[in-house]
């Protein structure tokens, strides 16, 4: 027997929406300049911001935004969208959760909510509320996201797709049916900025895509599939064609290793002249002592032939607390106004 949800209690818990920060509404340059004269994480952030500005000022540099973790749900979603809209990034490598459960989810008109109180998680489960630390998601709305992914998959020709190609279809869907202009997925489609999710099915997309395949098998029909090898090949192709590259990395994990490995992959494909990533910034709270990729320093990555040791900076901080400063500083310094749009997504058409 299904227990009826207490709609009044659910409404109380989902009463305060997360408001995403607008980096155009304040000028962080004075505080970043002041932090450069301090020590500890403040100075690290100022150095990282300077490196990002160098990326924007370098006319030859292709910039990848690399995202792991839940900063999009926590209030940085419009920040990332603004970086894309203002031509401050040329490609995105992210987790499926960032792209699907957070950005695409809000693109459909749904919201994330501040947890003003955190009751027993079993209580949240009974109300169909999912929790990300102190942020809530309505599970019923998330299921709408799953079903929309299913709808998109059912509309496609049954063949292999890279995550980039499928996410482009998601952006096209939002461009035609979405409820939010400021969506990273939608803007990426409109500006030919490729988005890669190397572990795409580890998200709400996974549920919709599994159902797509199961339904098609029952009907005796062919189904679409995701081609993870194509992800690696396409991203490496961009790296080879781009030459000079810079990485702005929030968190670590699979996206971080995936984008760094393009250098090694290019070498294996015979491109002996491929350059390591010239610029690199990583913002993380991961402990370096466990040896995991998420916490490996950029200096360590240099030993693998992935990044340049000369222009890199680790910032050990919770990204939601420092990315608004970095992004606002770079936005207001305005180097993006002179950048050429690269439109790497168009090379696969």
Image: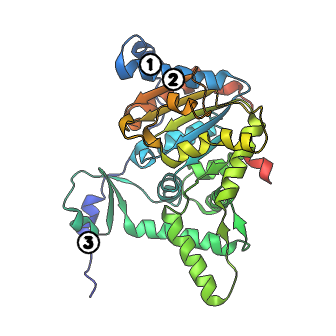
Task: First in sequence, mark 3 or 2: give its number.
Answer: 2
**Nearest to the observer: residue 108 or residue 251:** 251
Q: Name the front one of labels 2 and 1.
A: 2
Q: Which residue is mark 2?
A: 49
Instruction: Write the residue at 55% across / 69% down.
Output: 148
Q: Name the front one of labels 3 and 2.
A: 2
How crowded pointer 2 is (Cα within 10 Å; few <14, some 14-19, many 20+) is rated as many
CB atoms at circles 2 and 1 under 8 Å apart?
yes
* Mark sitting on residue 211: none
Dot 2: element: helix
Q: Which residue is mark 3?
A: 126
* Mark sitting on residue 32: 1
Mark pair 2, 1: CA separation:
8 Å
Q: Residue 165 at what x, y percent from top left?
A: 69, 58
Instruction: Write the residue at 70% across / 80% down.
Output: 222
User: Seen in the image, is 342 located left or right of residue 98?
Assistant: right
């Amino acid at each position: 027997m299904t227990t009826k949800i207490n709609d009044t209690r659910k409404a109380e818990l989902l009463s305060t929406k997360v408001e995403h920060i607008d980096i155009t509404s304040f000028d962080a340059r004075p505080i970043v300049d002041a932090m450069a004269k301090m020590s500890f994480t403040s100075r690290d952030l100022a150095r990282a911001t300077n490196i990002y500005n160098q990326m924007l000022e370098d006319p030859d540099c292709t910039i990848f935004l690399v995202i792991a973790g839940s900063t999009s749900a926590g209030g940085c979603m419009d920040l990332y969208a603004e970086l894309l809209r203002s031509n401050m990034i040329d490609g995105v490598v992210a987790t499926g959760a960032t792209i699907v459960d957070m950005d695409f989810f809000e693109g459909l008109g749904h919201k994330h909510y501040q947890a003003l109180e955190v009751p027993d998680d079993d209580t949240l489960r009974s109300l169909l509320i999912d929790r990300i630390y102190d942020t809530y998601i309505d599970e019923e709305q998330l299921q709408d996201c799953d079903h929309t992914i299913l709808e998109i998959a059912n509309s496609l020709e049954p063949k292999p797709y890279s995550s980039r190609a499928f996410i482009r279809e998601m952006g096209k869907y939002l461009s035609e049916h979405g409820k939010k202009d400021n969506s990273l997925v939608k803007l990426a489609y409109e500006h030919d900025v490729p988005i890669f999710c190397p572990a795409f099915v580890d998200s709400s997309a996974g549920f919709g895509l599994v159902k797509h395949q199961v339904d098609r098998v029952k009907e005796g029909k062919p189904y679409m599939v995701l081609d993870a090898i194509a992800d690696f090949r396409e991203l490496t192709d961009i790296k080879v064609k781009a030459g000079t590259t810079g990485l702005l990395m929030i968190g670590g994990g699979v996206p971080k290793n995936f984008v760094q490995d393009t250098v090694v992959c290019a070498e294996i494909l015979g491109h002996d002249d491929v350059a390591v990533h010239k610029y690199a910034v990583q913002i993380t709270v991961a402990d370096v002592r466990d040896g995991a990729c998420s916490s490996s320093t950029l200096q360590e990555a240099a030993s693998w032939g992935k990044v340049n040791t000369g222009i890199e900076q680790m910032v050990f901080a919770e990204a939601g607390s420092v990315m608004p400063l970095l992004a606002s500083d770079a936005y207001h310094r305005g180097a993006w106004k002179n950048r050429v749009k690269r439109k790497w997504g168009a090379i696969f058409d």
